[in-house]
Amino acid sequence: MTNAVSMSGVRKTFGRKVAVEGIDLTIPEGSMYGFIGPNGAGKTTTIRMIMSILFPDCGELSVLGKKSAVESKDQIGYLPEERGIYKKMKVGSFLKHMGRLKGLDSRGLDNRVKEWLDRVDLNEVYKKKCEELSKGMQQKVQFIASVLHDPDLIILDEPFSGLDPVNMRLLRTLIDEQHTQGKTVIFSTHVMFQAEKICDHIIMIHEGKKVLDDTLDDIRTRFDPRAIHIDPIGGEIAANIISQLPCVSHLHPVESAIEVILNEGFDTQDAMSAILQAQPLNRIEIKKPTLEDVFIEIVTGGEKSEDAQELRATLLAGTKNEEEASS
């Protein structure tokens, strides 16, 4: 299988700061890859090197079989983290301009632009200036600009940032469509649940280093669930009884349940049996590990320390901020 992107030993520094250290990865053509990690992890720097916006200090990199994305620019669609449109241009004119920059013939381009605007529910903005649009509308226009020329490789940096839930769902559908058509899709996000909803394969980056590179299914298989959700009969008293069991490390409330974190070395099924014997429950179920859980386990080595709690709080804050921006 041909690789859309290959990187070997890639390193990038800014002065004394090491932004990316020794990244090795291969992204096959036709795949859907997610770059995940907290803000500042090195995701955007990695993408910018793939796009030849930045150049590595050392290492080897190829894009669509060429040494540089510049050589394959008309086959690549890119939505950068820092959004940028020509605010004074009308939407239709802006998109046609972007299409011509990517090598599209002017014949039929107007209809192509209008069809895409209709697909994202923006058919009425064709003659409006870009600056008249809301932030979410501008983002959808920029997404169109990144795929209008039917690229083979689509790279999206934080594509869902600032979108409301309805438009997040629409954008996910459009990305899925591109992937179904055989396009290679790479997108980066610091909100990990988004990657779980859309990706086949995950690249997890922390402090400039790749800490995980695997399919979503294999990740879930490799990282055993260490948490159980329960709804005990008896409330706080019942929770105190369960917290004293040898298999239980600690527990804390989550939404309409209590999350029980197990000690290392205890089988999940055995722990569930012990909990049921100790206290009657309305509900008990295994919590599947999320990418957030996996990331924290990798970074902290599975230790339940203050550092792990702080890291979880940081990731949750990013998720909460994203949800608030979308509301």
Image (cartoon, grey):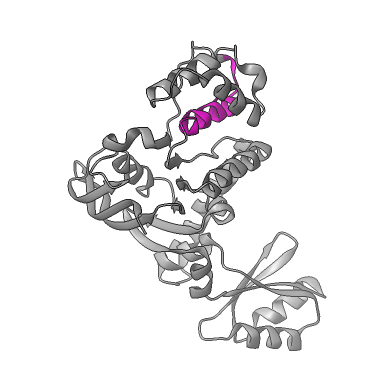
**Predominant secondary structure in magenta?**
helix
How far across and down, in percent of the image, does residue 58 sit? 17, 49
Q: Is residue 32 above or below residue 158?
A: below
Q: Residue at x 67, y 18 (%)?
A: 124
Q: Residue at x 52, y 48 (%)?
A: 179
Q: How many marks?
A: 0
Residue 35 located left or right of residue 139: left
Q: Is residue 121 among the parts visible in the rendering?
A: yes
Task: Tell me, yes or no, whether the highlighted magenta stretch contains residue 220.
Answer: no
Q: Residue at x 44, y 50 (%)?
A: 38
How far across and down, in percent of the image, does residue 226 sit? 57, 75
Residue 199 located left or right of residue 229: left
Q: Among all residues in the image, which is located at the extreme front? A: 107
Q: Residue at x 46, y 31 (%)?
A: 149
Q: Which residues are magenta?
A: 132-149
Quarter that holds the C terminus = top right
Q: Nearer the viewer, residue 1 or 78?
A: 1
Quarter that holds the N terminus = bottom left
Q: Is residue 15 above or below residue 116?
A: below
How far across and down, in percent of the image, does residue 16 sit? 19, 45
Quarter where residue 123 is shown = top right
Q: Nearer the viewer, residue 321 or 109?
A: 109
